[in-house]
């Protein structure tokens, strides 16, 4: 299979999600989920996502759609559109799937996925993490991971 085909297979549409999840669950894979805007991929993202992937066998990244990013970060964002951000994330070898969501939080996506592990940055408390209660109700864990100091999309944009 060509490299671009591998990347494209990782871009999961909502109507394909149930079948893909069923396959991974049949294989008894431990599913890890995180989400974000991932507007400008930088070292902090790479370390965060690789540490997140280490918590299971399958890493699913929920990606805020362009409209969702605009609502959360303002009309000047995202700098990269959802297609570019999706392909960039899917090109990382430790990311198994990328799925777009239009809402402000990935709660509905988390209800569908029911990951074994839900991960967010340590700037969130567990009470602030959308879907934490859903994951715990299904016997999963909620984990926070520290950010790498000095790396954020906002800081990079400011420098530019």
Image: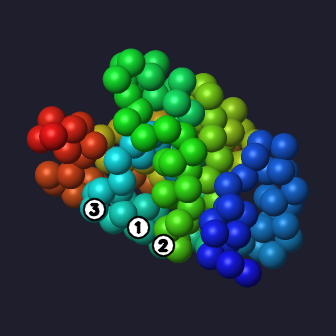
Q: Where is residue 148 drawn, in percent x and y?
A: 22, 57
**Of the residues under marks 2 and 3, which one precedes in the sequence?**
3
Distance Cα–Cα, label 2 vs label 1? 5 Å
The residue identified by callout 1 is 51
Q: Secondary structure at mark 2?
A: loop
The residue identified by callout 2 is 54
Nearest-to-viewer mark from 3 and 1: 3
Name the one closer to the observer, 141 or 130.
130
The residue identified by callout 3 is 43
Q: Which image quarter: residue 123?
A: top left
Q: Which image quarter: residue 65?
A: top right
Name the one closer to the observer, 50 or 126.
50
Could you classify mark 3 by the number of other residues whose Cα lies within 10 Å: few (under 14), some (14-19), or many (20 or more)? few
Scheme by which the image is coloured: rainbow
Q: Is residue 55 above or below residue 67?
A: below
Q: Is residue 2 above or below residue 99?
A: below
Locate residue 157 relative to residue 128 in the image: left or right: left
Locate residue 20 relative to residue 103 in the image: left or right: right
> Is residue 83 at least partly visible in the picture?
yes
**Of the residues under marks 3 and 1, which one precedes in the sequence?**
3
């Amino acid at each position: 299979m060509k490299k671009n085909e591998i990347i494209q297979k990782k871009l999961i549409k909502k109507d394909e999600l149930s079948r893909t999840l069923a396959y991974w669950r049949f294989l008894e894979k431990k599913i890890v989920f995180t989400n974000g805007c991932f507007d400008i991929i930088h070292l902090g993202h790479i370390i965060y996502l690789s540490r997140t992937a280490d918590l299971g066998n399958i890493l699913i990244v929920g990606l805020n759609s362009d409209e969702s990013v605009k609502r959360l970060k303002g009309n000047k964002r995202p700098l990269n559109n959802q297609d570019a951000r999706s392909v960039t994330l899917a090109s990382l070898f430790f990311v198994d799937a990328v799925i777009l969501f239009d809402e402000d939080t990935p709660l509905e996506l988390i209800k569908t996925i029911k990951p074994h592990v839900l991960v967010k940055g340590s700037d969130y408390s567990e009470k602030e993490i959308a879907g934490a209660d859903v994951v715990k109700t299904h016997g999963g864990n909620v984990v926070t991971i520290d950010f790498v100091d000095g790396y954020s999309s906002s800081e990079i944009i400011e420098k530019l």
